[in-house]
Image (cartoon, coloured by chain):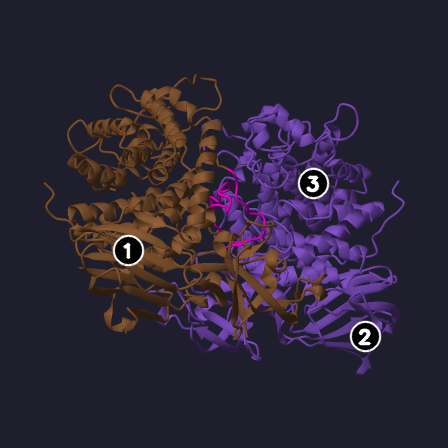
Chain colours: A brown, B purple
Amino acid sequence: MITKQLKKYKPLSFVDVKINDSFWAKRIEVNREQTIPFQYEQCKATGRIDAFKLDWKPGMEPVPHIFWESDVAKWIEAASYSLATHPDAELDALLNEVIDLIAGAQQPDGYLNVYFTIVEPEKRWTDLRDAHELYCAGHLIEAGIAHFKATGKRTLFDVICKFADYIDTVFGLEEGKKRGYCGHQEIELALVKLYRVTGNENYLRLSQYFIDERGKQPHYFDLEKKIQPGFFDPFMNSHQDKNAYNQSHKPVREQDKVVGHAVRALYMYSAMADLAGELGDESLLQACERLWDNLHNKNMYITGGIGSTRANEGFTFDYDLPNETAYGETCAAVAVVFWNHRLLQLDCDGKYADALERALYNGVISGISLDGKKFFYENPLASLGNVHRRDWFGCACCPPNVARLLASLGEYVYSQNDHEIATHLYVEGSGKFNIQSQEVVLHQKTNYPWDGEITFNFEVGTPEKIGLKLRIPDWCQDALLEVNGENVEIADKLDKGYVTIEKEWTNDDTVKLILAMPAQRFYSNPKVRQNINHIAIQKGPVVYCLESTDNIEPLQKISICRDSGFVEEYIPELLDGVVKITGKGMVMDDNDWDNKLYKPVKPDASPFTFTAVPYYSWDNREPGEMRVWIPEMG
Amino acid sequence: MITKQLKKYKPLSFVDVKINDSFWAKRIEVNREQTIPFQYEQCKATGRIDAFKLDWKPGMEPVPHIFWESDVAKWIEAASYSLATHPDAELDALLNEVIDLIAGAQQPDGYLNVYFTIVEPEKRWTDLRDAHELYCAGHLIEAGIAHFKATGKRTLFDVICKFADYIDTVFGLEEGKKRGYCGHQEIELALVKLYRVTGNENYLRLSQYFIDERGKQPHYFDLEKKIQPGFFDPFMNSHQDKNAYNQSHKPVREQDKVVGHAVRALYMYSAMADLAGELGDESLLQACERLWDNLHNKNMYITGGIGSTRANEGFTFDYDLPNETAYGETCAAVAVVFWNHRLLQLDCDGKYADALERALYNGVISGISLDGKKFFYENPLASLGNVHRRDWFGCACCPPNVARLLASLGEYVYSQNDHEIATHLYVEGSGKFNIQSQEVVLHQKTNYPWDGEITFNFEVGTPEKIGLKLRIPDWCQDALLEVNGENVEIADKLDKGYVTIEKEWTNDDTVKLILAMPAQRFYSNPKVRQNINHIAIQKGPVVYCLESTDNIEPLQKISICRDSGFVEEYIPELLDGVVKITGKGMVMDDNDWDNKLYKPVKPDASPFTFTAVPYYSWDNREPGEMRVWIPEMG
């Protein structure tokens, strides 16, 4: 029996959150109308769906790939979330069709994996490190939960419960079970979700086993590789411990530096936060906090992107944040949202919401084009003009990851406990809470992120005392709060980035929060050698960049003057509507340089008005160069 | 019969050049006393020498490697050059011993290659692209020539002539011959050398064939690979045409951009210059000139290093000159010296000598430690402290390449024709010329490169009219010239970087050249994005760097003030005697930054006196960081 928990809040479900704003509503609509159907077509066209028919025979192309399930599963998750807020008979039928195929692929013992059923059936569970078997299982579990919660149907849910029950018979500490765990973490967090839906503690314990066992000696992956020396191992030559790639270099509670593959890492940290919350495990929370500090204070791009190199799709060393070669995988930024959202429920600390918001408005949505049909896998902070979104990828983890996040975006706006509502994100719309024994609707009116004024109103039955927690973002240097026209001193009430107004709320109450949101110049910690003497422009949570289409090429010739102000202008027809920023810069002159690489003479420079646009919106127009960090001059 | 030549000058042989200065003499002595014996020991210890015994059997370790001959051959070249200026009975005997082994490995038909004689004899000439067979042959030929010229012995010389004659029967346009050429250029320039020594035009024609055939369609390497599909091909996935790696992507006369592996490229360009000179082939010279412009004006580090990436040990794209990840292979800088030296004989243009000098004083000698026993393969322009010279390498091309260059350094100081002496480098010592039917000795007295004053005197039999060409380096902004105390107006006489004094010289004449040589701040062309707003310090030809041992760590926090002067001080006990440079800088303060990566506040900075030392001398003291390009502030 679980008796202790660390969870203090729970998120308000996205089905109870309405988003009617000018920023996200459009993206969610594009996600629903373009991205989700488009991704189905891609899955279909590439053989990912039909693979579940199990009719592949040796010699046929394409060979089902070991992580195809995860792509289809994330699409099901996205489609189910969409269905939950926007009924759509056609999509419902399509989901049934795909789910029937998946259910038909389940083996009598509950096992469900195309590759290891028809391509190499004799190798089931023999390559946990690299073959993504439990990873795919985890995504199928998340898909089954999403579909069940959206539709009430148990068609996929029963399948994944049976699969999870089977996995529980295979892995664990008990005699005769494998002492392994997956080389790509994911099932750990999926099992916690399954526990929350079913109440079946076996799932929680299995997740706990996977986390606790990881990195112990004798090392499972070493043993596994001893049996199979022929397996391809791209990381044997890496400077890092090869087990650091999948964060099994030591037990998770001993880890204090982010290492290896970024998505693997953050999925694991998310599961650790989940388990800490559900099991009251302070040691897991402490490990999360150490890793959080290391990630957010030493290894994160200003866009919320993470992963400094393509070599391991992950981390290098503290303060190493190259811009052109930044990896910043879209999935990893999505995982930054996941992990911070989980930590936010354990401690309503604004630092988690700040990080979540940073990733969301920048490194996550840069991963998808404005038309919803082109995707970045990597999100560098500078481009020489050769980086562009693509329709799809052989390894297509990122596109459906953004799709499932956008389709459930409401989930990230509010949390609650029995007497408080916490507002993490500012988005016009409403949230419907069950609190203090009644239904309470909280309305937000705002033009965030272009403007920092937000007005709140309640719809309550009987006046009720509820604490309304409002987040004061870390980027905001000047915030004003009024309740029914009366100023509330924020500084007095600020606790971990939130101000709490406790009051018996009525339908006549109005709360107004004004977050000063001028475009600001941000500097990097001098330990980040790549950004010395450079600035980035950020307005509210939105990080800006220069694109050559608005400026000149090469962009490197532009500096921003130290004394320049920033002119902000909302342009409805630009990039689906953005605030454009212009300012005073200088442009270096290379006319005299054509036949020299080096001269003892400083290059001339002349005044130049630069134009910056939001980073997330780059590469939606003419292809060209892009830079986030710009030299500051004077 | 060869009737037309483009050669205008020939180098004065290093045996006729005495070097008695405070800079090079020490390095040549270390090369002779430390490096050459040490490299023999390395060759011996690693099995490279004994491999010529041909007693390797399958299963034995180490397996002779396909380019071992080239390492031994370059060592023979270095040892022979050394012997030519410093008789040494022990070294002479050691050379005889090694040469006996090599001669014993020659096959009856003249073939000479350990790997393809005993490891895979059936594969002789089947993998020209990757197996380095002709490359090794080329180095053996250079070794044989060097030994013959140094000692007059034909022991190795006859062997390599026989080998070259055999190669001539295998390759060529004639029916029944292979239409191939080597994937690593080298034999082309070796054959020209052999022609010059023997007068045998077959060698020149064979070199010409290799150069002319290269890159023609149908492509020899494509055909070769069709026959052997299993060969490892690391460049198939590269963004460049895979044949660009070895500069066979098109016929050499159509090439105008430096591509691929840098050493391969520059060895080829050197052969092209040789052939242009010997054959009067203007089209080859024009190709050289185009490629020279592209290399020197768009793809060369300020150190004379070349090769921007380790991926292909070579070129990326114009103006891409990353510092930390610069490849700058020592061999490639040596090849910059080779190529420019050859072009200098075709046209006494200072731009060639400037480039030669730039490479020599920086990117070449950075490749060897002051004690002569540790070597850089890669020469980056910035280091985080993890880059250090090593004793030896599995692929040990660089150490003996520097050794042979240092042992023959005198070769690069002067050229002559029948009435002119050209002085390319300023080095205290003398050159002994046969000119205008008599022996003329030219003396230089100078403390170059620490001081720019050079005094010249002649030793002549009868007064003789000789043109003395003196180079005015491109880095020099203010030069004074006096002949017998009378000022000569340089500007009037300057032609392609040289001023010529024509005079009947007597032993009483004194020429004094004063090259102003203050430490200067150099800027990069703004097209080099990596160096925007940075400066490098250069004094005369010597490029400086900051090392953390003289400054702070991390070095990135240091800027140099725009208005700072430079204080120069010669410190005899520092790094074998160098001019140290100090100046006014600022150091950023990261004390307030410990828990933030990004803040809307510019980091504080405080005054700091920086210390710079010559780039070539870095990593000879405490290990630490290093940077050539430093931000300029204010």
Q: What is the CA distance from the residue labelled 2 to the residue labelled 3?
A: 42 Å
User: Cβ–Cβ below 8 Å for labels 2 and 1?
Assistant: no
**Residue A66 placement: quadrant:** top left
Task: Name the residue at 40% across, 28% down.
Answer: A94
Q: Check the residue under mark 2 and report the chain it is in.
A: B
- Label placed on residue B187: 3
Q: Is residue B455 above or below residue A459?
A: below
Kind of residue at badge 3: Ile
Residue A79, position in %: x, y? 38, 36
**Crowding at mark 2 (Cα within 10 Å: few <14, some 14-19, many 20+):** few
**Which residue in the protein does label 1 denote?**
A442
Residue B136, position in %: x, y? 63, 39
**Which residue in the protein does label 2 denote?**
B491
Which element carries disc 3, helix, strand or loop?
Answer: helix
Q: Check the residue under mark 3 and report the chain it is in.
A: B
Q: Does B91 sit left or right of A478 as displayed?
A: right
- Is residue B306 rendered magenta in the image? no
User: Cβ–Cβ below 8 Å for labels 2 and 3?
Assistant: no
**Crowding at mark 3 (Cα within 10 Å: few <14, some 14-19, many 20+):** many
Which element carries disc 1, helix, strand or loop?
Answer: strand
Which element carries disc 2, helix, strand or loop?
Answer: helix
